[in-house]
Amino acid sequence: MPIKVLSEELTLAIAAGEVVERPASVVKELLENSLDAEARRIEIVTEGGGRKLIEVADDGHGIPSAEIPLSVARFATSKLSTIQDLFAIESLGFRGEALASIGAVARLELISRSVDEINGTRLVVDGGQVGEPQPIGTPQGTLVRVRDLFFNVPARRKFLKKDTTERRRISSLVSRYALAYPDVLFKLTQEGRVGFQSSGSGKSRETLAAVFGVDTARQMIALPATPDAPVKVGGYISPLSVHRGSRRGMTFFINGRYVQDASLSAAVTQAYHGLLMVGRYPLAVIFLDIPPGDVDVNVHPAKAEIRFRNPDIVFSVVQRVVRATLLGQSPPPAIDLQRSWGQADHSRSISPDWALSTADIEKPITLRGIQPALPAGDLPLLRVVGQVGAAYLVAEGPDGLYLIDQHAAHERVLFEALMQAGSQGKIESQTLLEPVTIEFTPAQATVMEENLEVLNRLGFEIEPFGQRTYRLRSLPDLLTDVEPEQALRSVVEDFEEDETPLMSETEARLAARVCKRAAIKAGQVLSLVEQQQLLRDLEECQSPRTCPHGRPTMIHLSVETLERQFGRRG
């Protein structure tokens, strides 16, 4: 095939693929345009997860009628003049590609009126075909309406996630920008319902409450001003009592721009090192003010990736400010001297003694009260030898030595028992003495709304109690030893931005989350009878060699391996 210059239509489609990855990408570009126009009110409406409709309206400066056709042309912008400007960018948008790229893969309608004009102007772009501008009566500001996203790029449309996932991405994005711009009112309506709204009062605590809930916002710790530091750091971090199961609760803004940067996440995580349990992460909303010349935002067309001129300095400043603030505001965790060494915090008393008591012999226990009647698995009969590090069981089998991860093994036992009980409609639940009212973030509330039926099938009894609030009345029996609010939050929180909605895998993934929370923990000392019971339960499982999340429950050291290690076999 001979070399030839690509058509303008094809180059637009290629460029659009870099800028517009999904509906949230469209919302991000339009939000940034509105903020650059100094809007004080931004309303976002979506339908079909953004596939059918994305509408962003603002009360900013607006676009003069003479510049409307240029606004949808590639590389046309009011934010750069010289090449030097490219290395000192102070606006959010600057590439001049957003509207042109969106118009290339959707049906775009642009309506705008500048502050100096009486009438507005309307312009339609249909799959890259630009129509004629028309006068129209409209308030000051700009409205961009995007319909049928990727209608002319079916391959790109096919690879979008389900509507629920795309809605969560949009909700997460809007709430993050609200945190950085508390003086701007953000209102997000999805599928005809208001999912998020900030006050626009300029009070950061009010915005924190709108995003994380009132209780969490009240506990967040403000970072002190750092006027003498090479990088100015501000924002809020969570105390040690507030944490999440993933890094998604950390949000970073550089000069007002939302960015995703692994080094910044690592700096905050390191600041909490030794203060949070392994696998738990803080909430953080951190704003960095850096001289524009010291940060390169022109790394990728989506403008989410950045490069620092002095990355080590930025990392060090963030880590030290967060650590110093945390230690200054949060007392060190108390030590319970009455608890046995290595024993996890668990309401049920477990004897640390290796010897069997009379009660143990006469009345063997079943862990967490579950004794699944399942077909035997593919494990040989194992004999318990003991426990190592209060985390692993040592067992002897006919073909060698087995090391069993007690947490992973118990997860598997509970999971199969719960799934079997669910298939028979026999999941037991415990009614709370007093219902617990829980407020969720916008993304978590969406997960709750979409999966109430699944949660109720698994033994929860939950009912809506306001826009983002739910009332918990019952818990599965597995979780009766866990504080009710934390039990439900731990099941929901890690699905905020999950690629696959819960309903696509029925209750299996959610059941796995319940069992992870309920299973015995590493560091929990088990009596010999409890160790034996856990192995018997594991032997009866259908898939005993992995936990529900795919981690191995055991390591096998064959007799041959041991002989080679001890030099008995060549």
Image: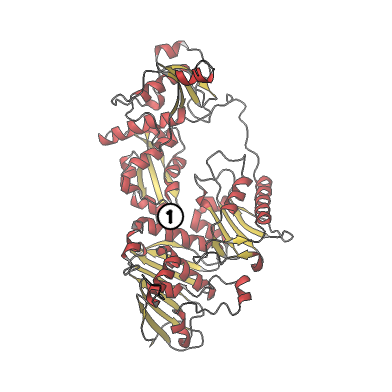
Q: Residue visible at 32% across and 45% down?
A: 505
The residue closer to the viewer here, 93 or 306, is 306
- Which image quarter is the N terminus in? bottom left
Q: Quadrant of residue 90?
A: bottom right
Q: Is residue 33 left or right of residue 126?
A: right
Q: Residue visible at 41% across and 29% down?
A: 410
Q: Quadrant of residue 44?
A: bottom left
Q: Is residue 464 left or right of residue 221?
A: left
Q: Quadrant of residue 205?
A: bottom right
Where's residue 481, x and y in %? 44, 32
Residue density around tag 1, few if under 14, some if 14–19, many if 20 or more, within 10 Å: many
Toward the right, the furthest residue is 228
Toward the top, the furthest residue is 358
The colour scheme used here is secondary structure
Say if 501 sits above or below 402 in the image.
Answer: below
- Which residue has dot 1 on it? 443
Say if 360 sits above or below 309 in the image.
Answer: above
Q: Is residue 89 visible?
A: no
Q: Is residue 166 left or right of residue 208?
A: left
Q: Residue visible at 57% across and 72% down?
A: 91
Three-letter amino acid code at the position of disc 1? Ala
Number of numbered discs present?
A: 1
Where's residue 59, x and y in %? 48, 76
Toward the front, the furthest residue is 2
Where's residue 480, x and y in %? 41, 33
Where's residue 75, x and y in %? 49, 77
Circle 1 sits in a helix, a strand or a loop, which is it? helix
The residue closer to the viewer here, 461 or 20, is 20
Q: Is residue 324 left or right of residue 511?
A: right
Q: Is residue 248 visible?
A: yes
